[in-house]
Image: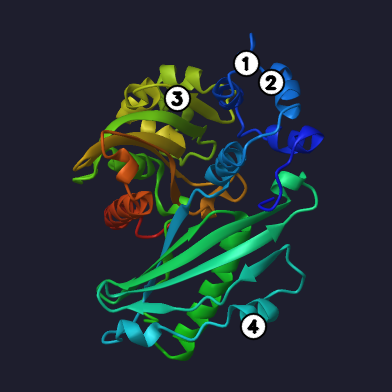
Amino acid sequence: MNNILPFGNELKDLLSESYITEAFLSKILREKGIIVQNNDKNSSFPILMSLLLSPNEFRLLQERNEEKEQKDKVKTTLYPIIEGVPLVDVCFDLDIHKILDDKLTYTPNYEIIGVPAYAYDKKEKEINVEVIIKTTSNTKGWSSRESNHTASLNIKNNNNNLTVTKKFTSRESEDVIDLILDDFKEKLENNKFLNKDKNIERILFNCFDNINRVAYFYSFTKISSRTLEFIEVTDIHILPDTDLPDDTEEEKIQTSIQEFLNNVNNLSLRGKKLQDHIVIEKEENHAFIQLKSLKLKYKIIKAGYEGTCVIEFEFPGTRNLKNSEFQFNISKIVLTGKDKHNVNKYELIKTINSVLNNHKLEQFEKLKLTSPS
């Protein structure tokens, strides 16, 4: 895909992708001096397929694909270790190719690019590892058949708890990083570094009751940060709780929420300032709903520029929801101001992720159940 400049029918696969919007195609045509009466793809497709895109225009289409695929999802696991273990001692040898050979019983649809290794950052007092994989799918068009994805681990020691944060951009990249984590855990056990009196913890759906889960999600509207300022909730996804305990019989549910959720399997709301929506705003409703995900819009405050970002917090999937692991991802960043073009987006995302990660762990300690259901 990086070595050719497609035209004609060869463009069809790429232009048909859902992330290539009608407005985006119309913008490319306008920049070529072509105005179409209708913005729908039926009108723009024949025109674009008859033209030769410039390398820059094709690069924009590729970047659109990368923006869709390369959004980091972030999850964290806490490994309790015995007192007095220096962080550098858990910077184990990493032979990812041997790990894959030992763990996999099938030939995966991806390959590892380069030679990943644990790297100890003495200044930041952390360990980092990054993996790049190339996936191949024969079920997709040529424009999406091969793609590169990244995954990473960040390891810190916080009061004899190894805080291991993984970032990934696709199912395959998460699979690879999970295999590395399995190997990491085995080496912790073999070196007798794990504290057997405490449990390894992940932020799971069943770590909260309905009320505390809403409180956990909504704590992200009150983040104390010099970088982010909460604006509004834009999306809510909830499930009615069909397995309520005995002390919350159906007759206790308020008539309004009972009627609202009648015959509803799941409910997705999209709009503005949804933090004021009756389903969520009234605390008495919280015991009867399972909050699955929220999208929050924040104002970005930095010297020289401003902007907004939309961040999704969720327990993904629908099967085995009780064991679904909490994750967040930055869905969108829009920057404004005279210095916006000088912004190091990688460093900005790193800062935002750090703020969110610290907050999620602090609130998890406050709101988790002592004995998950």
The residues tagged by marks 3 and 2 sit, at their Cα atoms, a distance apart of 56 Å
Could you say which quadrant of the image residue 83 lies in? Answer: bottom left
- Residue at the disc numbered 4: 98
Q: Is residue 283 above or below residue 126?
A: above
- Residue occupying image coordinates x 60% and y 27%: 21
Toward the viewer: 80 or 220? 220
Toward the viewer: 228 or 259? 228
Toward the viewer: 175 or 207? 175
Q: Nearer the viewer, mark 3 or mark 1?
A: 1
Q: Nearer the viewer, mark 2 or mark 4?
A: 2
- Residue at the disc numbered 2: 44
Residue farthest to the bottom, as pictured? 191
Name the amino acid, label 4. Answer: Lys
Horizontal and vertical percent position of residue 233: 36, 30
Q: Nearer the viewer, mark 3 or mark 2?
A: 2
Counting residues from the start of the chain, the first of labels 4 and 3 encountered is 4
Horizontal and vertical percent position of residue 213: 38, 44
- Residue at the disc numbered 1: 39
- Residue occupying image coordinates x 48% and y 25%: 269
Counting residues from the start of the chain, the first of labels 3 and 2 encountered is 2
